[in-house]
């Protein structure tokens, strides 16, 4: 039975019934329809629509994986206003040596299937340094999936090398790069981007890097930083550019809304978004991004209880075990100061929310379904 037949028309705000009908029939909504839906629909309606799409795409399954993070340095040449990780704002800096990084792989990644590598844009580290790093990791763990370097990091190292994007990405792939994370997207609106991170890669460059990666068989994630100065139109514009890119390449694995946290940065005067706004952006993203199979809630950013709730609002992936290996959000004030979850915790966590836990690899291939 179509979802619209389950919701009496009188309970849908004026002007939304046709939009809701399109969504339930699997017809793509336009940006102006998305704006109306975002601003007028009650959370209950967005939740119903997002959950219906989530079930159609992924059933009752919620994904997680065994992973660790490596953050080679927080020394960064950029000065993004929202960043709490940069050595200038954190109050201290670190630079892991190649030996320290490989030591972490040997000691901390024994059970991990993926290592996520990202950090500051260090002014003195080039593409050859990072290529050597990932090659060293593969020498120790040939089977581990390396998801590494945000588009901003890639832009800097490839530009410094004098290579074009395709050659630079191929060079890294030849040394062991398997996929790239979604960081660095922030917000695509050019005026707002200049305001909060004006000295880093442009939105166009971000999308160009991901497009080139996809064309080389390097998949990626996509993100959006929300909860600072952006308005609804700017959020939807951002999502629309991602949707357009996915239409062309099909290379995005998942979309991850990233919540702005206001501790230890130059935007600490801003209030963080309430939970209702978090729910709205996750649910709307599931509805609007019809060509993305997965919507991820990054639990170290949101906290466990909020992540658990979001599974009912379109989220089907909650990232991984982490093993207390990231400081990006803990420095910004996340309630998860030492993020780590074991497999049994994930299983119970997902089951308590009413879903089926599925352990996956980095490309969303199912490794084990915990359906009993």
Image (cartoon, helix red, strand yellow):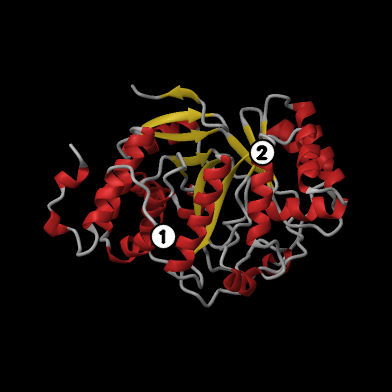
Of 284 and 261, the residue lying toward us: 284
Q: Is residue 265 visible?
A: no
Give the x, y percent position of residue 360.
51, 29
**Helix, strand or loop at disc 1?**
helix
| Residue at (78% x, 39% y) in the render | 172
Q: Residues within 10 Å of mark 2 (few under 14, many from 20)?
A: some
Question: Which labelled disc corresponds to residue 129?
Answer: none
Give the x, y percent position of residue 292.
47, 42
**Helix, strand or loop at disc 2?**
helix
Residue that mark 1 sits on = 31
Return the disc, 2 or 1, that comes first in the chain's sequence: 1
Dots 2, 1 in contact, CB < 8 A: no
Of 64 and 211, the residue lying toward us: 211
Q: Along the horizontal axis of the image, is 66 left or right of 372?
A: right
Residue that mark 2 sits on = 215
- Could you give the CA–CA distance between mark 2 and mark 1, rounded to whole angstroms? 27 Å
| Residue at (76% x, 42% y) in the render | 169
Question: What count of labels does the image hold?
Answer: 2
> In the rendered view of the protein, which quadrant contains the N terminus?
top left
Q: Along the horizontal axis of the image, is 113 left or right of 101?
A: left
- Identify the image quadrant of residue 213: top right
Give the x, y percent position of residue 266.
62, 74
Is 16 rendered above or below residue 22? below
| Residue at (83% x, 42% y) in the render | 98
Q: Residues within 10 Å of mark 1 (few under 14, many from 20)?
A: some
Give the x, y percent position of residue 154.
74, 50
Of 344 and 165, the residue lying toward us: 165
Is 20 rendered above or below residue 264? above
């Amino acid at each position: 039975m179509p979802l619209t037949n389950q919701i009496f028309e009188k309970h849908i705000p004026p002007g939304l019934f046709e939009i809701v009908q399109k969504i339930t029939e699997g017809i793509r909504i336009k940006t102006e329809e998305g704006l109306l839906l975002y601003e007028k629909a009650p959370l209950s309606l967005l939740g119903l629509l997002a959950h219906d799409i989530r079930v159609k795409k992924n059933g009752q399954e919620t994904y997680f994986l065994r992973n660790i993070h490596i953050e080679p340095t927080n020394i960064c040449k950029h000065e993004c206003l929202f960043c709490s990780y940069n050595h200038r704002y954190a109050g201290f800096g670190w630079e892991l040596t190649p030996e320290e990084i490989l030591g972490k792989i040997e000691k901390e990644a024994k059970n991990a299937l993926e290592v996520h590598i990202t950090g500051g844009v260090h002014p003195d580290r080039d593409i050859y340094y990072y290529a050597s790093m990932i090659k060293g990791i593969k020498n120790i763990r040939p089977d581990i999936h390396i998801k590494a370097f945000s588009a901003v990091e890639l832009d800097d190292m490839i530009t410094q090398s004098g290579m074009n994007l395709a050659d630079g990405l191929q060079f890294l792939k030849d040394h062991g790069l398997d996929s790239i994370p979604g960081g660095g997207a922030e917000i695509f609106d050019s005026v707002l981007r200049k305001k909060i991170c004006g000295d880093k890669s442009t939105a166009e460059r971000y999308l160009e890097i991901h497009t080139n990666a996809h064309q080389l068989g390097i998949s990626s994630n996509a993100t959006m930083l929300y909860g600072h100065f952006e308005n609804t139109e700017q959020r939807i514009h951002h999502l629309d550019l991602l949707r357009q890119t996915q239409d062309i390449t099909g290379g995005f694995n998942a979309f991850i809304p990233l919540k702005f946290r206001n501790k230890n940065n130059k935007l600490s005067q801003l209030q963080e978004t309430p939970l209702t706004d978090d729910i709205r952006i996750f649910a709307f993203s599931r509805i609007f991004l019809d060509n993305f199979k997965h919507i991820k809630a990054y639990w170290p950013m949101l906290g466990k209880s909020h992540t658990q709730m979001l599974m009912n609002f379109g989220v089907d992936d909650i990232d991984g075990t982490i093993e207390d290996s990231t400081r990006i959000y803990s420095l910004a004030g996340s309630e998860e100061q030492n993020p780590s979850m074991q497999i049994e915790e994930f299983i119970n966590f997902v089951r308590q929310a009413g879903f089926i836990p599925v352990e996956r690899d980095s490309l969303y291939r199912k490794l084990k379904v915990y359906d009993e």
